[in-house]
Image: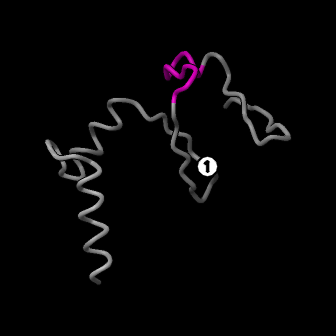
Amino acid sequence: MKASKITSNGRVTIPADLRKKYRLTLGTRVNLIEEKEGVKIIPVTNETIRVNVEFLGIKGKSLLKTLMEEKKIEREL
């Protein structure tokens, strides 16, 4: 297990070996997922996006268009 401290600005430094292992470079976006045990950090990669697009069934459609369609359905409920 690796450890790090949180700065006064709420920033956490990810150890270099983990950044290298998970290919976390400057500007890499991450999702923060709250779980019972704590917070999970998931890098947003092309693979993550591909899997979510397939899961949502929007392959070949605009993500914005799909989200707008979903919002319309929510308003009707």
Q: Give the quadrant of the N terminus.
A: top right
Query: Looking at the picture, how far across and down is residue 68, in whole percent?
Result: 28, 61
**Nearest to the observer: residue 21 or residue 62:** 62
Residue 20 in the magenta stretch? The answer is yes
Query: Looking at the picture, how far across and down is residue 30, in whole percent?
Result: 52, 37
The boundaries of the magenta stretch are: 18-28
| Badge 1 amino acid | Val
- The answer to which image quadrant residue 73 occupies is bottom left
Question: Which residue lies at the image location 56% right of the left edge and 46% below the top edge?
Answer: 32
- The answer to which image quadrant residue 18 occupies is top right
For disc 1, the marked residue is 39
Q: Secondary structure at mark 1?
A: strand
Query: Looking at the picture, how far across and down is residue 11, in whole percent?
Result: 74, 37
Residue 52 in the magenta stretch? The answer is no
**Nearest to the observer: residue 44 or residue 62:** 62
Using residue 40 as the reference point, say whether residue 7 is left or right of it.
right
Q: Is residue 36 above or below residue 4?
A: below
Using residue 18 as the reference point, say whether residue 13 is left or right of it.
right
- In the displayed orientation, state which residue is furthest to the bottom: 77
